[in-house]
Image (cartoon, rainbow, N blue to C red):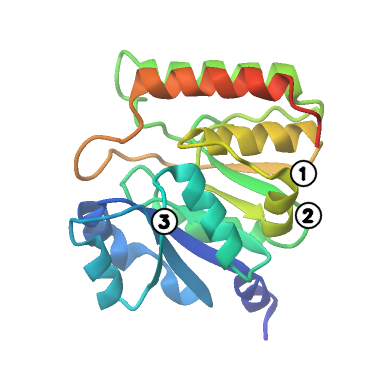
Amino acid sequence: MTVKNRKQNRVALVILTRNEIDGMTALVEHIPFSSFTEVFAVDGGSTDGTLALFQKHRIKVYSQTSRGRGEAFRIAAERTKAEYIIFFSPDGNEDPADILKFLPYADGSYDMVIASRMMKGAHNEEDDQPIKMRKWANNAFNLMANALFNRSGRFITDSINGYRMIRRAVFDTLKPDGRGYTIEYQMTIRAMKARLRIAEFPTHEGPRIGGESYAKSIPTGIAFLKLLFSEIFTKKR
């Protein structure tokens, strides 16, 4: 077995969905399923044909008992046997061409790897727009996280993005209990607190495929603020 294949055997690819038939239909042929020995989906109650598509492509599905992205992350960590987990959302924002870019980091050198939309060489969905409200808000939360918790000396450029890989044992240690979209932010903050090894590489964020995002700006922003203040008073892991 080659070094490359050993890394792939140690990494699980997890697809997170809730009514993503348009995105899955457009992207399924571009997802490198054959590069992984463990691939499965965690679904939050799709009713639009997403589950039938998974069945057609023989992709195992674990259904959530309660909705929310945080719950999907926790189910993935419970179900996998791999050392590392890559979380991928087939909504168009996350480029499937970048999935294999995580693999070189699965050599034990890093605990968490984030596909950054903010660093040099990356592209954010709003970069071509004159008003970048979502990007500016994300950068503000990112700055606060770095200022409050990061003592590693390496600035993390995209603490919020969910397109990431994490060592499963680290996930268990951090015990992220965030609900919804706060779980990615919480994972990064707790990794910063614990001085874990975090790497980033630039990614290209594309436009969403098939309808509006479930992450509504104002409610999500309020949830991030609550999470941030909660983590200030949470004992360092």
- Residue 34, position in %: x, y? 45, 76
CB under 8 Å between discs 3 and 1: no
Give the residue drawn at x 55%, y 38%.
Answer: 183
Q: Is residue 224 above or below residue 124?
A: above
In this picture, residue 20 sits left or right of residue 106: left
Q: Point out the image quarter for the C terminus.
A: top right
The disc placed on residue 197 is 1
Label 1 SS: loop
The local crowd at label 3, few if under 14, some if 14 to 19, many if 20 or more residues have their Cα within 10 Å, is some
In this picture, residue 45 sits left or right of residue 88: left
Q: Sequence order check: which comes first, mark 2 or mark 1?
A: 2
Amino acid bearing label 1: Arg
| Image quadrant assignment for residue 213 | top left
Q: Nearer the viewer, residue 170 or 153?
A: 170
Amino acid bearing label 2: Ser
Residue 36 seen by the camera: no
Using the numbered discs, state the Cα–Cα distance from disc 3 to disc 2 in whole angstroms.
32 Å
Give the residue drawn at x 32%, y 13%.
Answer: 131
Q: Sequence order check: which comes first, mark 3 or mark 1?
A: 3
In this picture, residue 196 sits left or right of residue 35: right
| Image quadrant assignment for residue 219 | top left
Q: Which residue is mark 3?
A: 64
The local crowd at label 1, few if under 14, some if 14 to 19, many if 20 or more residues have their Cα within 10 Å, is some
Q: Which residue is mark 2?
A: 109
Residue 113 seen by the camera: yes
Q: Sequence order check: which comes first, mark 3 or mark 2?
A: 3
- Residue 135, position in %: x, y? 43, 22
CB under 8 Å between discs 3 and 2: no
